[in-house]
Image: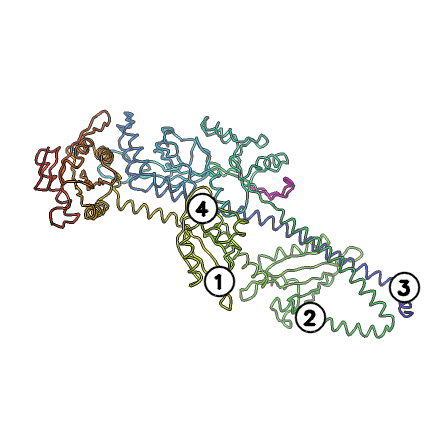
Amino acid sequence: MSEGWYAMKYLSKYHRNNFIILSVIIALIDVIFVFISINSSKQSLSVSIEEQAQQITQSYQTLLDQSKADMSLLTTVIANDPNVKSLIRERVNNPQKKENGNEIFNDLLRQKLTNQLKPAWQMIQEQYYIKTLQVFLAPDAKAFLRLDQPSVYGDSVDGVRETVTNAIANADVQAGYEVGRTLAALRAVAPVFGDYNEAQDQRGIKENNSVIAAIDVGVPLSNMLKRIGDHIDVEAGVTLRTSSIAKSMWLDYQEDYHRLQYIEGCLCIIKHQSTPIFSDLIRQLTDSSLIKQGYKQNVIEFDGKPLNVIQLPIISYADTLKGSNEEVGKVFFWKDASPLYEQFSKTVNQAMMWGVLGYVLAEIIILWAFVASIKNLETVIRGHTEDLEDSQSNLIQAQRIANIGSWTLNLETESLYWSEQIYHIFELEEDEHEPSYQLFLDVIHPEDRVKVDRAFRESLENKTPFYVSHRLFMPDGRIKHVIQEGKTLFSANGRPDVTVGAVRDITDTYVAQEKEKLAASVFKHANEGIFISNAKLDIIEVNDACLLFAGTNIDESKNANLLEFQNRFMQAKQFTEMTQALRKEGHWNDEIWVKRSSGEEVALDLNISSIRNEHGQVTHYVGIFSDITIKKRHEERLNYIAHFDSLTGLPNRILLTDRLSQAMLQTERSKKHIAILFLDLDGFKKINDGYGHLVGDMMLEHVAEQFQNSIRAGDTVARFGGDEFVFVIRNVSKPCAYDIPISRILEAVAVPMVHEGHTLHVSASIGITFYPQSESKLGAEALIKQADIAMYKAKAAGKNGFRIFDEGCVQET
């Protein structure tokens, strides 16, 4: 006890000043540590906010470029469709009808062009969010057809829609943002070329291979931004300048736009907003003078939260050609930055806590060391010398284990010291290279040298520590990633004396983090829906596409079991098959239909596989959804095309044969007869030759509609070819004409069709046969052949009547 008291007095008498100096140095180092940590956290926060803004901007630009490319390709495909070109040439190459104002001719062409474009119009609306599909005639860019507004045509967009006029003038695809007469949208316009025709050349009809029209499609930015919402968790909004709307748009459409929310401060209207707060956000930006020309990124305090707000300009197509930066509007993205600031606060608090603890612990150790040194100064000195040697050895070993190297730069003599580990990190031989600042810069990747040199020189100028991450370029082409930290010590007169620093090799950590980021990004942004469940089928992770397919949110999905989705996704039998296959084979695949919250039904191809551990036990299941709705729709469309006539919509020969065969099988069970009627139109050739094929097609459609109204449910009428039709009448009691609706069919044929003031009539010759016939076993083709023979007998007998093939009951009108 007395020795300890003596030591305290001894320390107080001889070493108080040294203890105070060391305490101040430790406090300074501690403050520097805290400062470096806080400064590093600030830099990381700024980098994270900027990276977030760049990611959103890049995603928007990528989507904008992809949309232009997709739309340009769509218009080019439509413009090169032979049927579309044929209809437009028919309009262009009939100047007499055009000049005489033959609106019936024009309306008929518009209807045919509408029917031709309708499948493509429906597809691009659903798949590409397209809102407009229009046809403009060269050379004056006059609107001939707007599929989105069929009643609006005849106006010229020359001087308003430069994409249209340039596509016609330059004979090339044009794309860009425009404010038109009815809509502000991203546009793509492709020229339609006339084909070479020697006969037309001789008659002087149009210049061959010239531009005769233009196909235009448009998608509003509000529609396009919905696609960004499918991939990135970010809010978005669009504003348009009122001056841009007033410049080009028709007054009644301007009124529609001005009914939207008007923001006086920025002289703009809100065209689109993903959330209702957008108007308040725009007003705050306007009041704070933060809405600037071009790209702008700010973090603002909004509703008690920090928001990362990105402003992107909307430059019109015309201004882009001029090289002008005049904006017609802006796209805004904003994202809650609270998580980034919370992480920053957490890091600062941890740095300060460790700083205080480190300081207190250092003070205790130093005090104890001073007290212990008093007992035997020489022993302590000798012990410290040995400890220093051990520490040096331990430091080298520790640096080797932690892959950290230290260095010291004497700024007065320009001499540089590198630890052994720095040579190892830089992959240099210690006995072959003398350390120098230039050698240090040579090892750094060429693209990072300026950044590292600037960081060091700015730290000298500002008298602050520096922290920089950069790459090393190895002789064999490999890249290493390191963190460089350092601090300069200054003399009493403010001159820099020595800079000490450390280099830490983080290559392995960096590569691992990048792989994790890539895997997470692939999982999140994959077009296929992906979910992961545990062995009990409890869902533990889902990606965005899976949520879209399932029509649910992430919290609801993560707390759910696959059993809970049984009724929504599949029938009980299919669910049982799935669970049994997973238990026995570890894999299951099938198609399911899911109804989204919007009511839309989509077809999905679902694959589920099990994941087993090293003991062969199932630990997880991975499910992958693929949207095959378009494929299923195409299959349905192909099935329709294969079995129905494209003009009349009636069954074709294939479906007729199938239905006739089914009816023949049914007669064997019901003991009743079926009648087969083969009908050929009388007088159709005269109409077709006299009025043209278009009117002939209209007559066939008219007759087909009358036929469908004249037969019972369960009976069949099919177009056999040309102006020939075949009826299959079921449940006929006796093989006789009185039991079949011949009168209704002849009356249906007799219904006239009025075209351009002309009343057009046709009649019909009908051949009839019945099944079964005595003991003979006839096939469907043979029965149709019998009815065909009987029809020719009816024709020979004077037309507008019928004949029965059955020799036992021959009747005719």
Of pointers 2 and 4, the one earlier in the residue sequence: 4
On whether residue 558 falls in the magenta region, the answer is no
Of pointers 4 and 1, the one earlier in the residue sequence: 4
Q: CA distance from mark 4 to mark 1?
A: 37 Å
Q: Nearer the viewer, mark 4 or mark 1?
A: 1
Which residue is identified by label 3? 12
Of pointers 3 and 1, the one earlier in the residue sequence: 3
Q: CA distance from mark 2 to mark 4?
A: 55 Å
Which residue is identified by label 1? 611
Q: Nearer the viewer, residue 658 or 396?
A: 658
Of pointers 4 and 3, the one earlier in the residue sequence: 3
Of pointers 1 and 2, the one earlier in the residue sequence: 2
Contact between marks 3 and 1 (CB within 8 A): the answer is no
- Amino acid at circle 2: Ile
Q: Is residue 121 left or right of residue 789?
A: right
Q: Residues within 10 Å of mark 3 (few under 14, many from 20)?
A: few
Disc 1 on helix, strand or loop?
Answer: strand
Q: CA distance from mark 4 to mark 3?
A: 77 Å
Residue 396 marker? 2
- Amino acid at circle 1: Ile
Where residue 446 sits, quadrant-wise, is bottom right
Please report the residue visible at 72 percent of the width from the left and 71 percent of the height from the top: 392
Which residue is identified by label 4? 66
Contact between marks 2 and 3 (CB within 8 A): the answer is no
